Amino acid sequence: MICFAAVTRVRVSFEKVGKRFDTRTVLAQLSGAVEPGRVLVVAGPNGSGKSTLLNILAGVIRPSRGEVRYRQNEEDIPRARWFAHLGVAAPDMAVYDELTAVENLMFFARLRGLEARPDSIGALLEELGLGAREHGRHVGTYSSGMKQRVKLAQAVIHEPAVLLLDEPSSNLDTAGHDAVARLVDRFRSRAAVAVATNDPREMAWSDARIELAL
């Protein structure tokens, strides 16, 4: 089985966050929070900064101004420890084509110091709609939708307290979207979830929404 850490509740807040790339301002004076037990949807046209905001919240890039805070029990979590609480799935994330889906997830589990068994990993993949007969194939042979399922699985393998999803249903059919919806619903009760999307079906998951503009 996968040995998960005890459930934690983490709040992510951002205050007057701005981001510039050279002379182009992508985000300006943006404030809000990703709250435990709620889903924040970040919507807006392509190029409006949805992915940039999630990358800032994940600590992948630093804002040009403003601050992001992770807090647990009213105490700040140092930036160096955000990764332990965080799960991310995004279109530009990579999986290892030369490994199988199970091998990919066992590798990601080990990076997080988790014990994992192929059967428990297989159950997670099946929850996301990747059938058992596909688990032993190299990911390089997968369709884009199948790879998306692996990315989603690695985002939640450690039951994160903060889950950031960038276009989570991209490349998925209706059944795949429904599987992601069930996953989001499962995490809604225990995690702080943010979803960047323009998909009306994903917007319907929101408890709170930020609308970005060009």
Image (cartoon, rainbow, N blue to C red):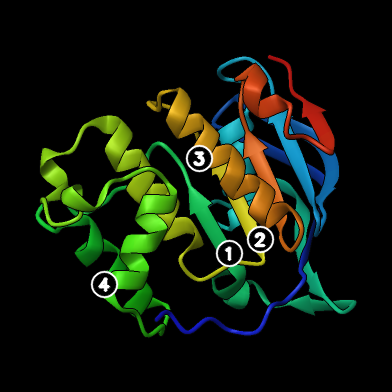
- Which residue type carries mark 3? Ala
Q: Nearer the viewer, mark 1 or mark 4?
A: 4
Q: Amino acid at mark 2?
A: Val
Q: Is residue 93 visible from the viewing direction of this image?
A: no
Find the distance from the CA under tag 1 to the CA under tag 3: 21 Å
Residue at 90 percent across and 77 percent down: it is: 74
Q: Report whether 146 appears left or right of 7.
A: left
Percent x, y of residue 52? 58, 37
Q: Secondary structure at mark 3?
A: helix
* Amino acid found under the numbered disc labelled 1: Leu
Amino acid type, mark 4? Pro
Residue nearer the viewer, 19 or 179: 179
Q: Is residue 174 above or below residue 42?
A: above
Residue pointed to by mark 1: 86
Q: Position of residue 153 (x, y in %)?
A: 41, 55
Q: Which residue is mark 2?
A: 162
Q: Which residue is mark 4?
A: 118
User: Residue beneath label 3, please?
Assistant: 179
